[in-house]
C-alpha cells in the first residue's frame, strides 16, 4: 500500500515519519516548516525522540514553505498515486488533497475528539480536569476539523511525574502506535470506521494563554492521579 505523509518538521513529526518509513511503503513525505514554540519544547522532544535527531528521510521528500493545498503539491502527490495519505501536525487540508488517495486521508489527533478538537487537547483536558479526554484518535480527514469518521482511539501511557509537555508527547506516541497497528487492517479493508456522535470543543492557538497554562500546571498531579487510578 503506497503511502504519502504530510506532517511538519519538528522532532515529534520526524518520529511519526520515521516510524512509517520503517514499517510501511512510504513513497513521499511533505514536511511543512514549523518553528518550535519554545526552547523547552525542543529540549523535551530531543529527550523523547533522541533517535530522530540525525534522522534523514530515505524517500523523496520536500519542505513546504507555502500552501500545501496549492496545485503544485496536488500534482506532486498525484504523481505518486498513493493508496493512503497519512497526516500528523500539518495544516488544514482541502478536498483537492485529502480526496486524492484511494483509501482516503488518515490523521493522528493527539486528543479524544468527543471532548477536544483542534490544538492543545491534552492541555485542555487537564485544565478542565477531564482525564478521559487524554489520549489519541485515528480518524479520516474531511471538511471538518478533527470530526471525520473515527478509526480507533487509545489512552496515553502516562506517569505521575510527567509535566504538561510529557503528557502531550505521550499522546503523540499513543497515536503513532495506534496507526502502526491499524494501518495493515486498513490496507486489507478490515476496519469499520464510525461517525462521531458528539463533536468535542474546538480549540485554537489563540484560546491558550499564560493563565490557562498556569492553571493546568496546578491541576496536573490531581488529573494524572485520577487518570492512573481509572
Image: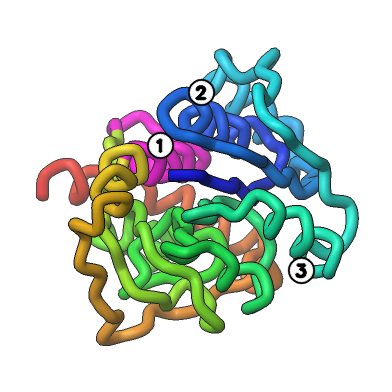
Residue 48 — which label?
2
Q: Residue at x 45, y 54 (%)?
A: 108
Residue bearing mark 3: 69
Rendering coords of residue 194 (x, y %): 24, 75
In the image, 139: left or right of 160? right
Cβ–Cβ under 8 Å for marks 2 and 1: yes
Rendered image quadrant of residue 24: top left
Rendering coords of residue 90 (x, y %): 65, 56
Question: In what element is the residue under mark 1?
Answer: helix
Q: Residue at x 33, y 46 (%)?
A: 183
> 101 or 162, which lies in front?
101
The residue carrying pointer 3 sits among few (fewer than 14), some (14 to 19) or many (20 or more) residues within 10 Å by Cα, namely: some
Question: In what element is the residue under mark 2?
Answer: helix
Q: Is residue 72 above or below residue 148?
A: above
Rendering coords of residue 33 (x, y %): 81, 46
Q: Quadrant of the N terminus?
A: top left
> 97 or 107, which lies in front?
97
Q: Earlier in the sequence, mark 3 or mark 2?
A: 2
Residue bearing mark 1: 173
Q: Is residue 222 visible to the viewer in this orientation of the structure?
A: no
Q: What range is drawn magenta here? A: 159-177
Residue 162 within the magenta-colored segment of the rendering: yes
Question: In what element is the residue under mark 3?
Answer: loop
Amino acid at each position: 500500500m503506497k503511502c504519502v505523509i504530510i506532517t511538519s518538521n519538528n522532532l515529534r513529526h520526524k518520529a511519526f515519519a520515521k516510524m512509517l518509513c520503517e514499517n510501511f511503503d512510504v513513497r513521499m513525505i511533505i514536511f511543512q516548516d514549523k518553528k518550535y514554540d519554545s526552547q523547552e519544547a525542543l529540549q523535551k522532544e530531543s529527550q523523547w525522540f533522541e533517535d530522530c535527531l540525525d534522522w534523514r528521510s530515505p524517500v523523496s521528500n520536500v519542505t513546504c514553505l507555502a500552501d500545501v493545498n496549492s496545485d503544485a503539491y496536488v500534482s506532486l502527490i498525484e504523481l505518486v498515486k498513493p493508496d493512503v495519505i497519512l497526516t500528523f501536525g500539518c495544516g488544514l487540508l482541502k478536498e483537492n488533497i485529502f480526496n486524492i488517495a484511494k483509501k482516503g486521508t488518515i490523521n493522528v489527533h493527539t486528543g479524544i475528539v468527543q471532548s477536544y478538537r483542534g490544538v492543545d487537547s491534552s492541555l485542555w483536558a487537564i485544565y478542565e480536569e477531564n482525564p478521559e479526554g487524554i489520549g489519541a484518535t485515528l480518524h479520516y480527514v474531511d471538511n471538518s476539523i478533527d470530526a471525520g469518521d473515527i478509526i480507533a482511539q487509545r489512552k496515553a501511557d502516562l506517569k505521575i511525574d510527567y509535566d504538561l509537555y510529557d503528557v502531550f508527547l505521550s499522546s503523540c506516541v499513543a497515536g503513532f502506535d495506534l496507526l502502526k497497528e491499524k494501518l495493515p487492517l486498513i490496507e486489507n479493508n478490515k476496519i469499520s470506521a464510525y461517525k462521531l456522535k458528539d463533536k468535542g470543543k474546538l480549540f485554537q492557538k489563540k484560546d491558550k494563554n499564560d493563565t490557562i497554562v498556569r492553571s493546568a500546571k496546578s491541576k496536573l498531579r490531581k488529573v494524572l492521579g485520577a487518570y492512573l487510578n481509572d
